[in-house]
Amino acid sequence: MTRKAGERVKRFWKGRGPEESPVLLGPRRVYILPTGEGFAFAFAVLVILLGSLNYQSSLGFMLAFLLASVGLVSMIHTQRNLAGVTVTVEPAPPVFAGESAHFPLRLDSPSGKKRYSLVVEQKGGERQAADISAGPAILVLAKGELRRGVASLGLVNLTTRYPLGFFRAWAPFESSATCVVYPAPLFTPLAAAQTGGGEESPGQALSPQKGGVEDFYGLREWERGDTPARVHWKSFARSGALLVKEFEEARAASLLFDYGRLGGYDPETRLSLLCGWVVTAERADKSYSLSLPGTTIGQGRGAEQRARCLAALARFEE
């Protein structure tokens, strides 16, 4: 077997590898084979033809050729029902390890031709049927039991047996859309983040070092997530630099989540602890930063800060 033939066989079973959406399923990408019903139908036509030859029955010949033509026409319609469909897979929203990712999938017919009985098959997953008639078909494909990192949807087959079920046409495709999988969070008190997660002080409360929010500490550079009320507008008017007023209470409430302080745990447990602290700090509306080997995310709060920190934990490789 030549290298080119080997690539064709591999493409036949496994598709063409990850592709950017939208994916057009052209005629050369659609494979077709008879189904069990198709073989039974062909056998019945053959029996009628042999009987007609034996008894010299013109009516039998007419019936055999009519049924054979119906089978051939159904093969053409089955192939054309799938060829020309475009598949668009969107990235799935981030999830935590152990949860299921949900990839939005859109089936469309650019030519405007209606498509019936299209079935999306996932390896080891569910089968979903859809029609393209009044508009595009929208499906959601789930992929569960995910591990931390970046997950892809994997190989998916779009199949059809329309109109008579004598033939099965299918087109494999693999989307490049991915889902960021955060570590499974382990929730412990935030005070453990200040002591390296040790058992000696797991329940300590974080308290201000000095007075309340009126005790001015100093100025620092503006970071994403800082509210306009804390911006020192006089400095901005004088120098054009965005500086933020920092107070003792806010400074004491700022947390540093450091991977290096969790030396007593394995890497995945460290990441789960850091993930739990990020989620807890965000719920408590506290400012926090994250330190990983090779990556440091500065102080901040809010949805963007949470997304940056959790994405860094998801993509971390020691």
Image: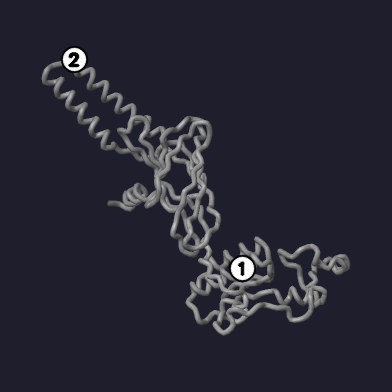
- The image quarter containing residue 279 is bottom right
- For label 1, the crowd category at 10 Å Cα-Cα, with few meaning under 14, some 14 to 19 and many 20 or more, is some
Residue marked by disc 2: 58
- For label 2, the crowd category at 10 Å Cα-Cα, with few meaning under 14, some 14 to 19 and many 20 or more, is few
Q: Residue 125 — which label?
A: none
Disc on the earlier residue, 2 or 1: 2
Q: Residue at x 64, y 75 (%)?
A: 256
Please tell me whether mark 2 sits on a helix, a strand or a loop.
helix
Q: Position of residue 108 (x, y in %)?
A: 50, 37
Q: Residue at x 45, y 38 (%)?
A: 130
Q: Residue furthest bottom?
A: 200
Q: Nearer the viewer, residue 31 or 106?
A: 106
The amino acid beneath tag 1 is Thr
80 lies above or below 248: above
Residue marked by disc 1: 280
- Residue 137 placement, left or right of 7: right
Q: Position of residue 46 (x, y in %)?
A: 19, 27
